[in-house]
């Protein structure tokens, strides 16, 4: 087996017994990139020279006995995370040549742990999208079917892990952008509780919804990554000073006696029949392991899409006001005056989907409409959170589909924004409530497309998610496959 197919914990053992070095695994990753990247297009920027230098330093640390959990592990970063000395584009023409003067806190944490940075992954422009089709750097393709989308907005991060172009990656999740592409690419994706991981150095889309999390090859690797990136950060005012456990202790724990809630509102018309069969099979597996599955209700679930697509664009409208062509980033040439420069810069610098969301958000926040839209959506959001609080008095975790259908074909929904928005119907509620969620592979369609299952837990209960998800992963009966690239 090529070493780039191994997991983090498998590589740790190889490093420890001396049978593999970080330099060797990093070279293996770049060989794989050279072989498949032209077809997958998971990356915007590759940092091979930096990576090989980091790998050599990691080998030195490991030989001296100073290696940590991620020392020497090749990791990819979604191109919305600031990286000192390496460009951060957010998939946008606006930041095409932007090189941050500092690292995001999560990047700093990974550096201190000795991780190797492979490159910056492709994404929907400013994380606004569900398919990685809106990047100004081109479309990322699903490694399982190159004619289909990998999900979004962290599609590049999920595709890179699925295609073995890195060992693990970081993505961001505003309405499902870690869990949805993880499900479509047959990898594991974890969205932590809002405030569990620092957002300092994350280029903001919707500040009350964004959260950084890992995308990995298995659940144990998610726990390892979360151990490194979680924790309080004084540089982020939304970071919560709560104790961070060792998440690896939850891996492999017995789930007998755990109660799993099945929300009746999530099992509606429109779910692909093969996904429904996979979910039923998952429920059977969990019950066989001693868990109790019971029906629950999330009565305001039907309002999630409407509330989200007012709150998120409103916050985006505010956050993206800084891109005006004055301070940094793209500036349109040949402007006649200041106002004309603003108009030309923002019109040509942003893509169609970003402009659509800015206009929706600006309208929702405008004088005379704020109470009718943003304020009301915020009130509905409070009701949605209350629904989850009530549900978690009746169960330990909630099980739901990650997506309504398998990956759709490239171009199939790009001209129908409403259909694209509806694709996040099962994931965005966790962001509105601020709770953690994880997507785990649970099989394939007859056509060979991945299916993912989603678990959600109460605030700061990532340990429960990892416990349930790892138990299911180790005992699931679906065939383990790798994409044929």
Image (cartoon, rainbow, N blue to C red):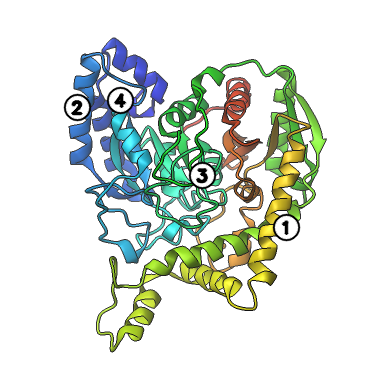
Tag 1's secondary structure? helix
Q: Residues within 10 Å of mark 1 (few under 14, many from 20)?
A: some
Residue occupying image coordinates x 67% and y 70%: 371
Residue occupying image coordinates x 22% and y 29%: 55
Q: Residues within 10 Å of mark 4 (few under 14, many from 20)?
A: many
For marks 1 and 2, give the CA distance: 51 Å
Residue 119 horizontal side relative to residue 192, left or right: left
Location of residue 274 (image quadrant): top right
Compare residues 400 and 432 and report the one nearer the observer: 432
For mark 2, what is the residue? 57
For mark 1, what is the residue? 303
Q: Earlier in the sequence, mark 3 or mark 4?
A: 4
Location of residue 25 (image quadrant): top left
Q: Residues within 10 Å of mark 3 (few under 14, many from 20)?
A: many
Does residue 292 sit above or below 440 in this rendering?
Answer: above
Residue occupying image coordinates x 62% and y 26%: 464
Q: Earlier in the sequence, mark 4 or mark 1?
A: 4
The quadrant the N terminus occupies is: top left
For marks 3 and 1, give the CA distance: 22 Å
Residue 176 horizontal side relative to residue 399, left or right: left
Q: Earlier in the sequence, mark 4 or mark 2?
A: 2
For mark 3, what is the residue? 178
For mark 4, what is the residue? 71
Residue 451 horizontal side relative to residue 295, left or right: left
């Amino acid at each position: 087996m090529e070493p780039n197919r191994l997991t983090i914990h498998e590589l740790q053992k190889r490093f420890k017994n001396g049978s593999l070095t970080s330099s060797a695994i990093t070279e293996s990753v770049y060989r794989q990139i050279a072989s498949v990247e032209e077809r997958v297009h998971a990356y915007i920027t590759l940092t091979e020279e930096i990576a090989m230098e980091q790998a050599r330093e990691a080998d030195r640390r490991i030989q001296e006995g100073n290696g940590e959990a991620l020392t020497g592990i090749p990791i990819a970063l979604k191109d919305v995370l600031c990286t000192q000395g390496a460009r951060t584009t957010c998939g946008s023409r606006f930041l095409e040549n932007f090189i941050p003067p500092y690292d995001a806190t999560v990047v700093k944490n990974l550096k201190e742990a000795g991780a190797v940075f492979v490159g910056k992954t492709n994404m929907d422009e400013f994380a606004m999208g569900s398919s990685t089709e809106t990047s100004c750097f081109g479309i990322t393709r699903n490694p399982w079917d190159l004619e289909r989308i990998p999900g979004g907005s962290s599609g590049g991060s999920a595709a890179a892990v699925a295609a073995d172009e890195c060992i693990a990656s970081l993505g961001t999740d505003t309405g499902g952008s870690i869990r949805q592409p993880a499900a479509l690419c047959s990898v594991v994706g974890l969205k932590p509780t809002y405030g569990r991981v620092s957002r300092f150095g994350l280029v903001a889309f919707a500040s009350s919804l964004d959260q950084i999390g890992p995308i990995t090859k298995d659940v144990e690797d998610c726990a390892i990554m979360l151990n490194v990136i979680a924790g309080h950060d004084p540089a982020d005012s939304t970071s919560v000073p709560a104790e961070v456990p060792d998440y690896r202790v939850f891996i492999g724990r017995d789930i007998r006696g755990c109660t799993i809630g099945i929300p009746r509102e999530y099992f509606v018309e429109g779910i692909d029949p093969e996904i429904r069969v996979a979910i039923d099979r998952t429920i059977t597996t969990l019950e066989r392991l001693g868990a109790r599955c019971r029906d629950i209700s999330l009565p305001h679930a039907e309002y999630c899409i409407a509330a989200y697509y007012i709150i998120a664009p409103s916050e985006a409208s505010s956050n993206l006001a800084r891109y005006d062509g004055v301070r940094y980033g793209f500036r349109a040439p040949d402007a006649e005056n200041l106002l004309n420069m603003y108009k030309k810069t923002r019109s040509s610098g942003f893509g169609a989907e970003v402009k659509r969301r800015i206009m929706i958000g600006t309208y929702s926040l405008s004088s005379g409409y704020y109470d009718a839209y943003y304020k009301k959506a915020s009130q509905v959001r409070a009701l949605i959170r209350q629904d989850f609080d009530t549900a978690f008095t009746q169960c330990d975790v909630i099980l739901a589909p990650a997506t309504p259908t398998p990956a759709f074909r490239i171009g199939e929904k790009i001209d129908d924004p409403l259909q694209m928005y509806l694709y996040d119907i099962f994931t965005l509620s966790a962001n509105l409530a601020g709770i953690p969620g994880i997507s785990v592979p649970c099989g394939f369609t007859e056509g060979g497309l991945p299916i993912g299952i989603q678990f959600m837990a109460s605030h700061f209960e990532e340990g429960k998610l990892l416990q349930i998800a790892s138990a299911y992963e180790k005992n699931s009966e679906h065939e383990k496959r790798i994409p044929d690239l």
